[in-house]
Image: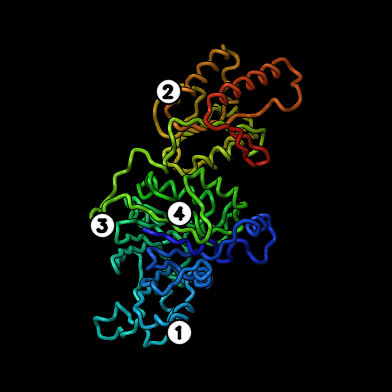
Amino acid sequence: MRLRLLGTGSADGWPNPWCECASCRWAREHEVRTQTAVLLDEVMLIDCGPDVPRAATRFGVRLAGVRHLLFSHAHPDHTGPAALMWRAWTTVADQPLDVVGPPACLEACRAFVGPWDVTDVDQVAGGSGGSGPLRFHPALAGDVLRLGGFEIRPVAANHGDAVIGPAVLYDVTTPDGGRLLYACDTGAPLPRQTLEALTGRAFDVVLMEENNGDRPGFGDHLDLPGFANVLAQLRQRDAVVDTTLVIAVHLSHRNPPGDALAQRLAFMGAQVHPDGTVLDITPATAPAAFRGTQRTRPDLGPGSLPRPYRILVTGGARSGKSVTAEQRLAAWPGVVYAATAGPVTPGDAEWAARVHAHATRRPSHWTTVETADLVPLLRVEGSPLLVDCLTLWLTAHLDGDWPARVDELVTAWRNTRRHVVAVTNEVGSGIVPATVVGRRFRDALGRLNAAIAAESDEVWHVVAGIPTRLR
């Protein structure tokens, strides 16, 4: 299965030509992206906005061999019907082309082609479908189309209304058994019937939109938390498995600059690729096994979380360390969140508000365990574990034999079989505490942090919301 990413940007591209934000400035200097489209096996083009034919020319790609054109919805960056008119002026005008899309897309195309150019495939049996080279196929959620050896399953998107579609995502199986999910455009959550339709599909590649970055609220699009949440749902349902290549597309300047975005997506097990990238994918199943079957999840693969694996995230108060730790695991189902704060003291509204903010920020598919007894959690094999935080764990044990408890925790951390992320505070960089107990706590936490860091696979320091890897 060969994929050519003819574009990976949003409707306005990245950078937006009118904008001078930091994200657009980075894009101008490093990586320009135009409207999202993918060419599959050189014969199937999925989405074709106005940028796409020019992008193909820029990358040395001729579209004369395209035999199947799929539109996801009728927004103009996805459906540029003028391309069909331009095709009519060429040497391949008489060659058949399947045009697949929701009803609104097909109607938009009719204004740019003559009625003699069109065959309405769904009306041919009644004798009124026409006989033109452009074969129009309506695509509605739940349909199954088989064209040129491809199997095409439209599923419902969470994007707009019937005026632009209804918008669909495409589950495509290639002639060699490769499986692609084209999930663009959509917001969160995915419709229930879509999640059910994708259960067990075990895609080789998922192209999923991530338009809104850290600035949610713009249209029916995914932001970074929404992208993570949908990806976790797809993993939970074995639509995304350990061997699935997940690529973010439909990227805009609402995202952080590209290098920071790539790091955030890597935490989720997803990638970004520049426009023009060519990917040759070997399907994970034999061709005879792909239709109507579910693939068994492998034990471990390149898209899985390594285990055992230990990550320590440190930083000052309100530095963004907890958010950074949560981002490491947001796209993974079954996470256990160990909250070490203990019960809120009655009447302490400020602390209660802090605890509530942490709780509401956690993904709904995580399980929270309130405990300061971390050693048993580290000693058992299980799903990914997030500990927030070691500072409060030490507070709970400082009155006892804390050096022994620290040694026990460090041993359990070293020997754990889990993928675990722990948050701690960096408290030794400020003023010297005025009290004996304050100095004692500062010193104890410094020793704990150093001991845990020494046994960690990764150590990160967060300042002003920006994580920097120390190891």
Nearer-N-terminus badge (1/4): 1
Q: Is residue 368 above or below residue 240?
A: above
Q: Is residue 101 visible?
A: no
Mark 4 vs 3: CB contact within 8 A: no
Label 3 CA crowd tier, 10 Å (few <14, some 14–19, many 20+) = few
Q: Which mark sits nearer the N-terminus, 4 or 2?
A: 4
Frontmost of labels 3 and 1 is 1
Distance from label 1 to label 4 (Cα)?
A: 42 Å
Chain-order first, disc 3 or disc 2: 3
Q: Which residue is mark 1?
A: 89
Say which residue label 4 marks: 189
Q: CA distance from mark 1 to mark 2?
A: 69 Å
Pick the quarter of the image with the C terminus: top right
Residue 186 in sight from this viewpoint: yes
Give the alpha-carbon distance from disc 3 to disc 1, as whole Å: 38 Å
Tell me the number on the disc at residue 379.
Answer: 2
Q: Is residue 91 left or right of residue 199?
A: right
Q: Is residue 183 above or below residue 466?
A: below
Number of the front mark, 3 or 2: 3
